[in-house]
Image: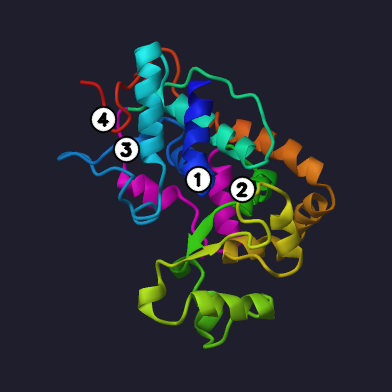
Amino acid sequence: MIVRYNVWAAFRSDTRIAASLLRLHFHDCIVDGCEGSVLLDDTNDMKGEKNAPPNKNSLRGFDVIDDIKADVERFCPFTVSCTDILTLAAREAVYLSGGPYWPVGLGRRDGTKASENSANEQIPSPIKPLDNIIAKFTSKGLDLKDVVVLSGGHTIGYAQCFTFKRRLFDFNGSGKPDPTLDNSLLTSLRGTCPNKDDSNTKLAPLDSASTYTFDSAYYSNLVNNEGLLESDQALMSDPRTAALVNSYYADPKLFYKDFGASMARLGSVGVLTGQSGQIRKKCGTVNY
């Protein structure tokens, strides 16, 4: 209830926080497992994940997790890990946005180190080929279906222009836009992200049909060539992933069911239990 109330309060003042918390959880779990390493601040002898290029100036929601942790510590000190809090917060964020609710098993412990190199190597890039992205998921025990289902998290939130700008002006060095991008979306995105460096950090919605509502519109967008990121639209280029996209486009209830199952799998990647790790007192620092 403490996690739910705090996420609700944050969501009420900033609807975008839902997508930010979901992404924060994904970036934690996909790098060396779900052990809260993404929450650790850099120290003199540790360059962590927070300031790695895929995360710097783009990950958000740390303050929400810190607030929840402070509340939880007041009621049950040294009991609930930052990793469990982040996992619960992601579930609550999706549910508040209109998405599915799934059971979250608890008992994860917090790791004691973080690595910038791990973040750079393990976080999937939106401009890498689909096979590269699939390989990063399978290395964590996730599968092709999880790639398509978890990509559906892009039904909420925003992306910075630099993550997709080459699709608008100079796709693969052609001097032309990505031919798979819908023309009216191309015109609109060029308005948001002109071909100048000072537009790099401007934001565009990942799902312009329903930016703050967790629904299956993401898949409709892909079917209509309106995916924002290369890695989104690429799901239509492989018959295996395209078949799944079409099934979620046709059956939103199936997407909700499968999203909960994939999130539960994601939340079990590389967890620390028993005597491994620790229960951090503050999420940004290791207990010494």
Would you name the residue on which mark 3 appears?
114
Query: Is there any visible trace of residue 26 in the rendered image?
Result: no
Q: Residue furthest bottom?
A: 175
Q: Which mark is residue 23?
A: 1
**Magenta segment, which residues?**
112-140
Q: Earlier in the sequence, mark 4 or mark 2?
A: 2
Looking at the picture, how far across and down is residue 164, in whole percent? 51, 69
Q: Residue lying farthest left? A: 44
Residue 35, x across and y down, in percent? 42, 30
Where residue 14 sits in the image (x, y, percent)?
Answer: 48, 46
Give residue 153's mark. Answer: 2
Instruction: Give the CA separation, mark 4 to mark 2.
Output: 29 Å
First in sequence: mark 3 vs mark 4: 3
Q: In the rendered structure, are the residues bearing label 1 and label 2 in contact, judged by CB atoms less than 8 Å apart? A: yes
Instruction: Answer with mark 1 or mark 2, whichever residue precedes in sequence.
Output: 1
- Which element is circle 3 on? loop
Q: Which residue is mark 4?
A: 285
SS at badge 1: helix
Q: CA distance from mark 1 to mark 4?
A: 21 Å
Of circles 3 and 1, which is in front? 1
Amino acid type indicated by mark 4? Thr
- For the residues labelled 1 and 2, the Cα–Cα distance comes to 8 Å
